[in-house]
Image (cartoon, coloured by chain):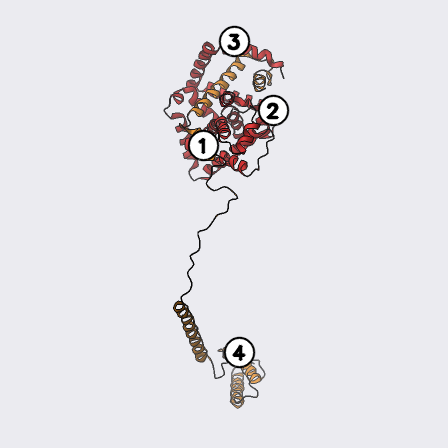
Amino acid sequence: MSDILNNKIVGSESESPVDPDAAASVTVVASALDRLAAAERASAPSGFEQRLARATFPSSPVLRIGDKVLSPAVANRPWHPLRLAAAIGLIAAIGAAYFAVRSSLIDSNANGSGTRFSKATTSDTSIDLLVLAAVFEDSPILPELESIRSEAASLEEAMQSEDGFSYGGAM
Amino acid sequence: MEAALISKENHGSTPDLVPILAAAAAGDHDAWSQIVSLYGRRLYALAKSRCKDGEVAEEITQSVFATVAQKFGIGQYQEQGKFESWLFRVAMNRIRDHVRRVKRRPGFEDSHSLAETQAVATPTAEQDDPMMRNLRIALTKLSDSDREIVELRHHGGMSFKDMSDLLNEPVGTLLARHHRALKKIKEFIENNPEGAAAAQNVVEGSEEQEGVAGRIPAQGKRKVVS
């Protein structure tokens, strides 16, 4: 079959009638390519096929696909009571230290009951005071807040009288 | 049996592979060795022609047979009379992958031209032949698809029918492209004075040794055979 096809290459392709010289030169190229290919095959290292067959033989792989991979036995090392006690003690110490640091931070940032006060900007002072008044309406600091509010109101009035502008915020 | 197989290896004269493949898949080492003997060097030559590196060619060949062995080992391979096409498809994919990897490397152009130079300047007896050198250069001038056809046919020793299965192209198309590729190679060699002289030597040598000139008219007459 292949010989027939090969002959067909020479005789049947787009050149009719066939130019014998052209066909001859193409055939020469084909035979030269065959020689080149033979040289490439011969250039394989010695023992190539034997090595290849050994390396790739289907039943030769050390680990076949589908085989289970057995892990080495995990060392059975029971916890020694002293080691366990030391671990518990260490965890307890770390926990205690954490809570101590946390509570000290809260104390340093807190005002009595732990409520935090953020610093308000000057323009927000009136609003903050209103909010504080609402939140601490029934608390013991209300009189103090009232005095602060009256001071703020008087300050605003003084400023209005100086430059004629209203600074909003009905108190 | 092995000798018979090897003697038929050129241009894909297909021996009865089915029992050999079945035996190899069943773990018969001799059968596996026969398959390797039949195709090992053909795959190696194919890979070496494209990759220009014997070690890479050996790696690719081994990788292809490892894939075949894996399919055999897990019972995935079903013989449908297309073993050779499948084998060479695996090989071509590996070769293409390798070529793509090489092309992505920085400074590929320089290394590519260097590889071409090395390919034609390696001081072996075969490569000292100017015709061989010119053929190697001419192969690099072909388009990838034309080069694949030429290399599958000559280096891989495939039949056009198996190439048709492999490349999903009609046999007639492959014949035409192969013929055109040979003409391009011929033109390249003719335009190269050194190669033309060498080609002339080859023609004269072939005429003396093999009677090629006497055979060509006979081939021409056989063109009616289809």
For disc 2, the marked residue is B171
A22 to B116, vertically: above or below:
above
Q: CA distance from mark 4 to mark 2?
A: 89 Å
Q: Position of residue A126 (x, y in %)?
A: 54, 82
Image quadrant in which the C terminus of chain B is located: top right
For disc 4, the marked residue is A124
The tint of chain A in the picture is orange
Instruction: Check contact, mark 2 vs mark 3: CB within 8 A.
Output: no
Q: Position of residue A64 (x, y in %)?
A: 50, 41
Q: CA distance from mark 3 to mark 4?
A: 111 Å
Instruction: Residue type at mark 3: give it.
Output: Gly
Q: Position of residue B143 (x, y in %)?
A: 52, 29
Element class at badge 4: helix
Relative placement, left or right, of B108 versus B85 is: left
Q: Residues within 10 Å of mark 2 (few under 14, many from 20)?
A: some
Q: Residues within 10 Å of mark 3 (few under 14, many from 20)?
A: few
Circle 3 marks a residue in which chain?
B
Circle 4 marks a residue in which chain?
A
Element class at badge 1: helix
Q: CA distance from mark 2 to mark 3?
A: 28 Å
A103 to A51, vertically: above or below:
below
Residue B112 sits in which quadrant?
top left
Instruction: Check contact, mark 1 vs mark 3: CB within 8 A.
Output: no
Relative to the observer, which residue lies in front, B202 or B138? B202
* Dots 1 and 3 on the same chain: no
Q: Name the residue: 42% across, 15% down.
A: B197
Element class at badge 2: helix
Q: Which mark is residue A52?
A: 1
For disc 3, the marked residue is B214
